[in-house]
Amino acid sequence: MERYIRLADKLSAWFGKAFAWCVMVMTLGVGYEVFARYLFNRPTAWAFDLTYMMYGTMFMMAGAYALSRDAHVRGDFVYRLWSIRTQATVELVLYFIFFFPGVLALVFAGWRYAGRSWRYLEVSVMSPANIPIYQFKSVIVAAGVLLVIQGIAQVFRCILAIRTGEWLKPDDDVEELEAVLQKEGLSAIAHGSEAIDVVEPREPRR
């Protein structure tokens, strides 16, 4: 199980980091649009389509990566008080009740949606440039498949946590600045890479 988890984590990280470059394409496109629109009064017909396609692709393809790093939002005001075995048991049940049905629905519905788009080579109706978007619809299926692969790894994580009483942490990776600052001088209650804002009180200055 641990080998599968590590393999799935690496696969999700590779796709997440590869598609993170979409933000650079989006930034260049928007920068060029602003430059052309306000300096030369010649707005482009494709910048809007580029923006939502790049952002949507980055957002979808990074979902499995975020799941592998425990970076999705969790309302854990009760969860963090449980033992690790209780956390893992609840997560394991919820993966089968909510996660897998939702993600599998995304894959199957996305397959039909993308297939229909490819059959007639769909173009955008948001601009007169007729930008092809059928390839963009395929991202739905790809993101869903990655989430299924990573979801199985998370189920294995839960099983190992129930057995051992410890969460198997992912490999070291990039960290948010807030997490780095907390490690340097503040203490926090943490689950995986997620930090809870609990700060030690400091003595008042005299």
Image (spheres, helix red, strand yellow):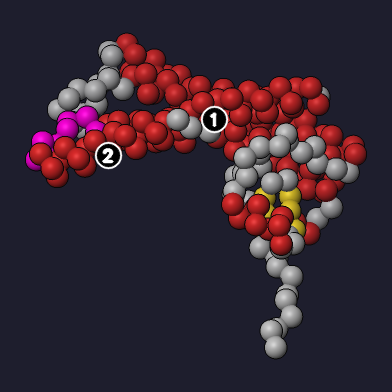
Q: Which mark is residue 17?
A: 1
Task: Report the residue that reaches farthest toward the front.
Answer: 206
Residue at the outermost right position: 164
Q: Is residue 104 visible?
A: no
Residue at the far top: name it: 119
Is any atom of residue 27 visible in this view? yes
Q: CA distance from mark 1 to mark 2?
A: 22 Å
Q: For residue 37, which quarter of the picture?
A: top left
Residue drawn at (66%, 37%), measured in percent from left and top?
173
Give yes or no for residue 42 being in the magenta stretch. yes
Provide the residue designation for mark 2.
Answer: 31
* Quadrant including the N terminus: top right
Task: Identify the residue at image location x=27%, y=39%.
Answer: 31
Q: Residue 24 in the image: x percent, y percent?
A: 39, 33
Q: What's the residue type where badge 1 is placed?
A: Lys
| Kind of element beneath mark 1 | helix
Q: Residue at x 68, y 28 (%)?
A: 9
117 sits left or right of 179 in the view = left
Query: Splitting the image into 4 quarters, where does residue 202 fall?
Result: bottom right
Label 2 crowd (10 A; few <14 / some 14-19 / many >=20): few
Residue 6 is left or right of residue 25, and the answer is right
Q: State the residue in front, 31 or 170.
A: 31
Residue drawn at point x = 36 percent, y = 31 percent:
25
Which residues lie in the magenta part?
41-47
Among the two numbered marks 1 and 2 on one chain, the one whose residue lies closer to the N terminus: 1
Q: Nearer the viewer, residue 184 or 164?
A: 184
| Residue 70 rendering spot, x and y as whole percentages | 66, 42
Q: Looking at this view, is 64 or 186 the one in front?
A: 186
Quadrant containing the C terminus in the rendered view: bottom right
Q: Amino acid at mark 2?
A: Gly
Compared to residue 8, the image places residue 178 above or below, namely below
Q: Which percent across, then down, holds residue 87?
A: 78, 48
